[in-house]
Image (cartoon, rainbow, N blue to C red):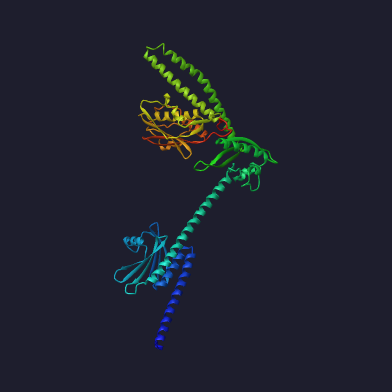
Amino acid sequence: METLEDLQKELAESRRENDALQQTVAELLGLKDIASKIASTRETNEILRVLVDAVRDVVKTDDIMLSLLEEGQVEYRVRRKSEETRVIRRKGPGMMLKNEIIQWIIKERKPTAIPIGDDHLLTVVPLLVRSEVVGFLYIDSPSGEETLSPQVIEQVTLLSNVAAGALYSARLLHHLQEQHRVVASTLNYLRDVVESIHNGILTIDPDGRIAQVNRNALLMLDASGDVVGKPYGEAFPPETHSWLGAMLEETHQNGFAIERHVTVKLPHAHDLPLAVATSLLRDDQLAVKGTIVVLRDMTASKELERLRRLDQMKSEFVHNVSHELRTPLTSIKAYGEALVDFVSGDETALKFLKVIDGEADRLISLIEDLLNVARIESGKLQLNLAMHPATALVEEVLHLSKVQSTRHQLVKEFAPDLPMLYVDKEKLKEVAINLISNAIKYSPNGGEVRLKLRVEEQNLRLDVVDQGMGIAPEHLPHIGEQFFRVDSSLTYKVSGTGLGLAIVKSIIEAHDGVMKVESEVGKGSTFTMLLPIRKEPKGGTDLLKFRE
């Protein structure tokens, strides 16, 4: 039978256990409050201070330091000494421990006690976010003192990981805020640019609703209020809706940029002549996202109109002179060929006639180039569009003398299953002839000319790669300009007018394509043609004018 003394002992033990349990509950509640405070804080310095102060209260020591890692470098150092908690931001590789020990702790991802000399013990607690070490908490204590208990280590680890999560959230929030600031700043800047442009600009989505419009476009089209999101037929007067709708339909049907001159009747003002250009709005994958419309007030463009008239006069002059020159040149060439039979035994005369014939051919080629340029500039370049196999654009020109050379080898690299294209085959054959003949002319030492044909991101890509003299970087931006020729000691012997690539570029752009060039002096050049792959439009026409 238990005595009174035994019962008193049991009661005292129960009271001690109850007190210990209450203390544990109080500690856990305290940890919960601290963890909640840390988790709700979004300021890095405050998170670090709260964490170090809380750890001080748990481990009963003031000698605490914390370091955070950012891309392998120490970003922050927090030092707790006596009654002061200091947060120091410092970039650099410095660590309290050797790199081998740090790497081991990172690998194991658990608290570790490490002797420092003969009289100190350093407890290192890694800060973890999603199993990734983002920093270290160092607790320095004399080695003679009692080591930290598992319960204390567990509490410190809990606080450290809560702080690590809060730091990660703070960094993520800061990053998102910075991105939002940059995006907002960029959008405001672009909006200011669009509003400051003298021309009127509006974009219309595939459903026919206005996606964006600047104030000048509203003024030019006699619209007011918030028209964004409305169908363009409701936002603008009926007269505007009529011609704008026709231009949008033609642009979407044919896929080409077009320009028209219209007159808008404004109330209480004079008639406003406008030049209206429409083109498809595409993303980086060339997918259609809508239509962009640019309006130019032609009443404020007298100088532009004067230059246009001068340009028209120049084109007409070139056209007329070219026609006048072509007839006598054709006669000269014909009589020269006829004279060959009469001087068959005279080598000197044959040599002279050969020179006459060659120079006549060169002049006729120059005249044809001038006529093509005149047609392009006057808007009379016609595209006879039809469906053709992609390979025909190259295959049908390889037998021509212009692309033949005994010193060069034409190497075809055609991808299988190339599609049909809705293009002007004859015009694109001119492109192929010009690119291949240029590759031969500017490779005087011979070599391979590779013709690569493949599909790339909904585009047909033709690469003409030579092993010739190449083009210096400072000349590359001018390739495709009229009459531009590279002037160097390597090219002076190569004949040419500087019009061929200008015509090539215009024909490619008339098909809504792109011409590119890459080159390295002494190694060769790569001329690239990119054409969007289109199918024949329903109810479309096979005869279009370029920039009518």
What residue appears at the point 49 percent right and 55 percent down from the top-left corner? Answer: 178
The residue positioned farthest toward the right in the image shown: 268
Q: Which residue occupies the foreground of this view, 502 or 9? A: 9
Considering only vertical position in the picture, is 180 above or below 283?
below
The residue positioned farthest toward the left in the image shown: 118
Q: Is residue 62 visible?
A: no
- Determine whether, in the image, residue 356 is placed left or right of residue 307: left
- Image quadrant holding the N terminus, namely bottom left
Q: Quadrant of residue 70?
A: bottom left
- Image quadrant holding the C terminus, namely top right
Please state the horizontal and vertical placement of residue 85, each as a whole percent of the image. Answer: 42, 69
Q: Which residue occupies the foreground of this view, 6 or 209? A: 6
Please state the horizontal and vertical placement of residue 367, each as a whole percent of the image. Answer: 49, 24
Please state the horizontal and vertical placement of residue 424, each as a whole percent of the image. Answer: 51, 30
What residue appears at the point 45 percent right and 21 percent down from the top-left corner? Answer: 361
Please state the horizontal and vertical placement of residue 23, each as a whole percent of the image. Answer: 44, 76
